[in-house]
Image: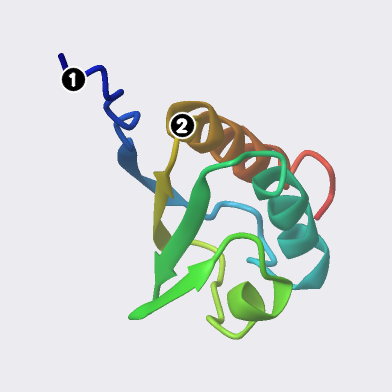
Amino acid sequence: MNLKKEPPAITALTRTLKVTNPSGLHARPTSEIVRCAMRFRSEITIEANGRRCSAASIMDIMTADIRSGTEIVVTAVGPDAEKALDAVEVCLGELEAKGL
């Protein structure tokens, strides 16, 4: 009798979001996104302007030159992917209210 456990399924989810804060993703708003992304075990990536970057890397995101009005594709791969995407969406939506 084989009692091998199957590895847990890895969940990959994607969401398209729009950057609405007037200044886009410069240093301060990017640091908010990175802080948010680092709370999760899932690997979170952001695609914009033909570039894919880690949501846990300030330099990665800043060099993508993501301006206000840009649509970004956020992907989370891991056990808490849905929660991670929800949190990134909330964080992105709150940037303008925080004056970033």
Q: Classify 10 Å Cα crowding around label 2: few (below 14), some (14-19), many (20 and above).
A: some
- Badge 1 amino acid: Asn
Secondary structure under tag 1 reads loop
- Percent position (x, y) of residue 78? 44, 40
Q: What label sits on residue 79 in the rendered view?
A: 2
Which residue corresponds to mark 1?
A: 2
Towards the viewer: 3 or 55:
3
Q: Are marks 2 and 1 in contact (CB under 8 Å)?
A: no
Q: Quadrant of the C terminus?
A: bottom right
- On the question of residue 29 being in view, the answer is yes
- Badge 2 amino acid: Pro
Towards the viewer: 42 or 15:
42
- Marker count (numbered): 2
Q: Left or right: 24 with respect to 13?
A: right
Q: Residue at left 69%, top 80%?
A: 59
Q: Is residue 73 above or below residue 40?
A: below
In space, the residues marked 2 and 1 are separated at their CA atoms by: 26 Å
Q: Residue at left 30%, top 23%?
A: 5
Secondary structure under tag 2 reads loop
Q: Left or right: 61 with respect to 53?
A: right
- On the question of residue 70 being in view, the answer is no
Q: Classify 10 Å Cα crowding around label 1: few (below 14), some (14-19), many (20 and above).
A: few
- Percent position (x, y) of residue 10? 33, 37
Dot 2 or dot 1: first in sequence order is 1
Q: Quadrant of residue 94?
A: top right
